[in-house]
Image (cartoon, grey):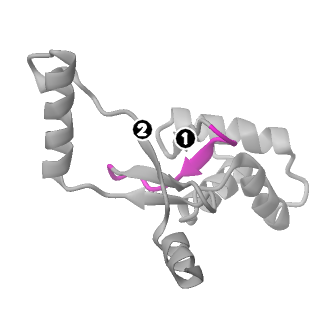
């Protein structure tokens, strides 16, 4: 795929972000750098970057998909209180245990038959937990 200034800007925004922006948030940042960029261009470039394996899409049950430019294996937790999406980096042992438990539950003999797709857990982030404790 040919170089595109718009795609480069979109990729840099996602890769330099640690808060997992939505497409609209990427657009709001991109338009500051390139005022002529359109929202459809941002969506198209996000889709292309995902297809190329340069970014990950994080589908959420509630709300807009988020995007992640950090490709090392990790999972996510969305805070039920504030909506913040944070990275979870379980140990290799924790992932092996999860796969083993899934195999037992699903009666699958070989854990090589299970691939962990994007996993998004729901919980309360440390900041919201702390805020709740201080109110009590």
Q: Secondary structure at mark 1?
A: strand
Q: Specify start and end residues of the magenta stretch as a single range.
A: 62-73
| Quadrant of the rendering where the C terminus is positioned | bottom right
Q: CA distance from mark 1 to mark 2?
A: 9 Å
Q: Residue furthest right?
A: 36
Image coordinates for residue 47, horizontal then vertical, percent = 63, 35
Residue 112 seen anywhere in this rendered image of the structure:
no
| Quadrant of the rendering where the N terminus is positioned | top right
Q: Local crowd at mark 2 within 10 Å, few (<14), some, or many (≥20)?
A: some
Residue sitting at x 68%, y 41%: 45
Residue at numbered disc 1: 57
Residue sitting at x 20%, y 44%: 95
Residue sitting at x 53%, y 32%: 51
Residue at numbered disc 2: 118
Main secondary structure found in the magenta portion: loop
Left or right of 128 on screen, residue 33: right
């Amino acid at each position: 795929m040919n170089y595109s200034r718009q795609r480069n800007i979109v990729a840099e925004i996602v890769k330099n972000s640690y808060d997992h922006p939505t497409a609209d948030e990427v657009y709001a940042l991109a338009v500051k750098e390139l005022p002529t960029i359109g929202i459809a261009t941002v969506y198209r470039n996000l889709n292309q970057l995902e297809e190329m394996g340069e970014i990950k899409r994080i589908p959420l049950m509630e709300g807009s998909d988020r995007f992640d430019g950090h490709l090392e294996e990790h999972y996510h937790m969305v805070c039920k209180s504030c909506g913040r999406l944070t990275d979870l980096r379980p140990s290799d042992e924790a992932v092996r245990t999860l796969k083993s438990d899934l195999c037992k539950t699903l009666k699958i003999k070989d854990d090589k038959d299970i691939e962990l797709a994007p996993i998004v857990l729901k919980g309360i982030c440390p900041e919201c937990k702390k805020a709740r404790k201080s109110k009590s």
